[in-house]
Image (cartoon, helix red, strand yellow):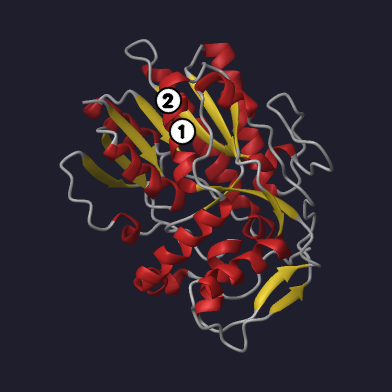
Amino acid sequence: MKKIIITGGCGFIGSNLVRYMLKKKFFVINIDKLTYSGNHYNLRNINSKNYIFYKGDFGDKKKLKKIINKYKPEAIFNVAAETHVDRSIDSPEAFIKSNIISVFNLLEVIRGFSKKRKIKLIHISTDEVYGDIKSMRSDEKYPYQPSSPYSASKASADHLIKSYVRTYNLPAIISNCSNNYGNNQFPEKLIPKMIFNILNNKTLPIYAKGKNSREWIHVYDHCRALYCLFKNGKNGNSYNVGSGENLSNIQLVKKLIKVFRQKSIKIGKNVKIKFVKDRPGHDFRYALDSKKISKEMSWKPKLSLEKGLSMTIDWYLKNPNFFKRISKNFNYKRLGLKL
């Protein structure tokens, strides 16, 4: 049985990837330091003999070496990261430590094992490294122009990884993915925050006038893409992973409300869109050209946005304990206002 490590496996994308890879008959080692967005609830009901959890920082070189020596994994999927732009505006140091320093330590550990065994690194990055895309769509050759401490830290990690591929011939592949949504997502992100507020009869805060455009992909389709990259990705390559479906934030929130109404779910009188002060340096539009992964691996998303949103709402309705379990770590106050 093939063994893999998933870092940040108790978070949103990580927990979905853990479940996906277990279904693909992998032995999964999950390393997560359980910060505010990591939650054991995300992996409840997993009693598989092919799954094991280690609490800790994936950048802890000593601990990571012991785990690799014990299990001899074929690959490491690096999902762990600080991800929320607003938090990076308030507290950039945490993003530098997690998204750059820990990635450096991870690369050094992999390099140390390179003479004994090749460990493939699948690094999960973001479309935000390309910055503000005024028109067209950014392909993998588009220049990096990060705008926030978050996207700059992810861009730094991407560059560092590519330098290790070229200098040390490390086997590594990068996924630059668009905005994910789906099960287990921490409600500081737009879609789960709106779902939480609708279910709790709260206003729906949207930055500026809600015209900022994002490309959305269901986390299940991202996990499918990551599996394809593990199987068929070319060493040293980056692959954009997107749906091609762009909506402005105001359009997205209105679509969410529409899906709620289609399900005959009562919406409270306080559920109204409220425009709030924009975040500093807010990129207007992200849009990916994902032809490369489609052409090389015949991958394309299976879930339309409307279907994915419906599934996501159903999941939150069926899992009310999710919000209860994370409520202590959920900061209801607005972040990202420090200048």
Please state which of residues 226 and 59 is positioned toward the viewer in this rendering. 226
Q: From the viewer's perspective, tell me whether residue 90 is left or right of residue 6.
A: right
- Asked if disc 2 and disc 1 are in contact, CB closer than 8 Å, the reply is yes
Q: Amino acid at mark 1?
A: Leu
Residue that appears at 47% across and 17% down: 171
Residue that appears at 63% across and 65% down: 255
Residue 215 percent across, percent down from the top left: 66, 47
Residue 331 visible in this rendered orientation of the protein: no
Question: Mark 1 sits on what residue?
Answer: 226
Please tell me the numbered disc located at residue 230. Answer: 2
Residue 29 visible in this rendered orientation of the protein: yes
Alpha-carbon span between mark 2 and mark 1: 6 Å
| Label 1 residue SS | helix
Q: From the viewer's perspective, tell me whether residue 73 is left or right of residue 277.
A: left
Mark 2 nearby-residue class (10 Å; few <14, some 14–19, many ≥20): some
Q: Residue furthest right?
A: 134
Mark 1 nearby-residue class (10 Å; few <14, some 14–19, many ≥20): many
Please state which of residues 4 and 46 is positioned toward the viewer in this rendering. 46
- The image quarter in which residue 86 lies: bottom right
| Label 2 residue SS | helix
Residue that appears at 75% across and 35% down: 137
Q: Amino acid at mark 2?
A: Phe
